[in-house]
Amino acid sequence: MKSRILGPLLTLMVLLAGAAWWQSGARWRGALYCAEQPGQVWGVAPIPAGATLLCPESSSVRAEVRRGDTRIEQYLFADWQPETLLRLLEAEGFTRLSTRPDDGIQFEAVLTSGRERVLYIAEHRGEGTLVNLGGTPMR
C-alpha cells in the first residue's frame, strides 16, 4: 500500500520542484524582464499614460540585468516628450546632477538620490521618444 502512494507522491514532488525552478527564472525569459517593479518607473512612480515599457532585446544586457550588474528600463512615447519621466523622477526625490540639452539627437541628464545615480537619455525616434534609464544597482 505504501509503495502505491510513495511512487506518485515522489513524482509529484519532483514535478513541483521543477515547476518552482522554472517559475523562478520566468522573469528573465519575458519581454519585460528589466521591470524591477512592473507598472512603476524605476520603482518609484506609476508609468504615466502614453508611455510603453520596453526592455532591450540583447541577450548580453539581459544577462547583465539578471546578474545584478546593471539596471535598465526603457519607455517609448508616440511624440517628443524628453522630460516627462525626468520630472516624474524629480517629483519622487531625484535631483539633477547634470544636464545636456537636446542636440537634435538626444537629451541627457544624470540624476541622483542618496547614493543612487541614474543616467537618463531621451532619444528622438521619428516623432516619438525613447527614454532610457540606466544605473548600477545598489548592493
Image: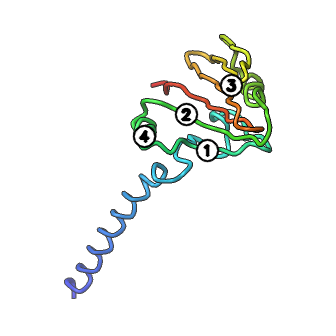
Mark 4 lies on residue: 66
Viewer-proximal residue, 33 or 105? 105
Q: Mark 4 or mark 1: which comes first in sequence?
A: 1
Q: Amino acid at mark 3?
A: Ile
Q: Which numbered circle lies on residue 130?
A: none
Q: Mark 4 or mark 3: which comes first in sequence?
A: 4
Name of the residue lying farthest toward the left: 3
Q: Amino acid at mark 1?
A: Leu
Mark 3 lies on residue: 105
Q: Mark 1 or mark 2: which comes first in sequence?
A: 1
Find out whether the residues at labels 4 and 3 contact each other: C-beta distance under 8 Å. no
**Secondary structure of residue under mark 3:** loop
Viewer-proximal residue, 56 or 40? 56
Of marks 1 and 3, the one in the foreground: 3
Mark 1 lies on residue: 54
Mark 2, Cα crowd under 10 Å, few <14 / some 14-19 / many 20+, is many
**Secondary structure of residue under mark 1:** strand
Mark 1, Cα crowd under 10 Å, few <14 / some 14-19 / many 20+, is some
